[in-house]
Amino acid sequence: MVETKKKTVITLICERAVDLDREMDEKGILKDAPDVKVIKFPCSGMIQPLMVEAALKAGAEGVIVCGCQIGDCYYREGNKMIRERLLGERPPGLKKTVDRRRVVALWLSRLQTKRFISEAKEFVGHLQTLNSNTEGK
């Protein structure tokens, strides 16, 4: 029997967006969603599309980009910048080869922890469905 390694969903998150400190273990893994690894940035504007691409190329199942609610960026417009980059409205954008079904963006306040966990679990389920649909081909 071949053992398949469980793949991880990488979360690139603004440290001022949703508060996940109590929800993670010391390695940055969500306790309620062990498939999700969290990497914090001072601002979501520091997240580059190349980071999303690198995570997927390195074997991540998917990537969640999370910033403050639009209009509430601590550093003025970092969340708008990464949102526009992910949408291809501002350079640099995601390369055309990136499977957009494996990338999700969330814009949440510090208090929306439950919503983040719910959305992350839903995204993990979405990725499992994608994988089961492509494995049969």
Image (cartoon, rainbow, N blue to C red):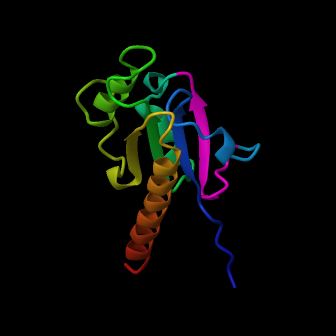
Q: Is residue 81 left or right of residue 3?
A: left
- Residue visible at 33% across and 50% down? 100
Q: Which residue is at a point 40% across and 81% down the rendered structure image?
A: 136
Q: Is residue 122 above or below residue 27?
A: below
Q: Residue furthest bottom?
A: 1
Establish if 79 lies above or below 56: above
Furthest-top residue in this view: 76
Residue 29 is a magenta residue: yes
Residue shown at the point (26%, 36%) measured from the top left: 87
User: Total label count?
Assistant: 0
Image check: 122 left or right of 77? Answer: right
2 inside magenta stretch: no
Q: Is residue 78 left or right of residue 12?
A: left
Q: Residue at x 41, y 64 (%)?
A: 126
Q: Which residues are magenta?
A: 28-42
Extreme residue in the left direction: 89
Give the x, y percent position of residue 63: 47, 47
Q: Could you tell me residue 44's position as x and y percent?
A: 46, 27
Residue 54: x and y in percent read 51, 40
Instruction: In the rendered view, tell whether residue 55 sits above or below residue 17.
Output: below
Q: Quadrant of the N terminus?
A: bottom right
Which residue is at the front of the view, 65 or 76? 76
Judging depth in this view, the residue of 119 and 82 nearest the camera is 119
Closer-to-camera residue (17/61) = 17
**Picture quadrant of residue 73:** top left
Q: Quadrant of the C terminus?
A: bottom left
Predominant secondary structure in magenta? Answer: loop
Above/below status of 78 relative to 49: above
Q: Residue furthest right?
A: 26
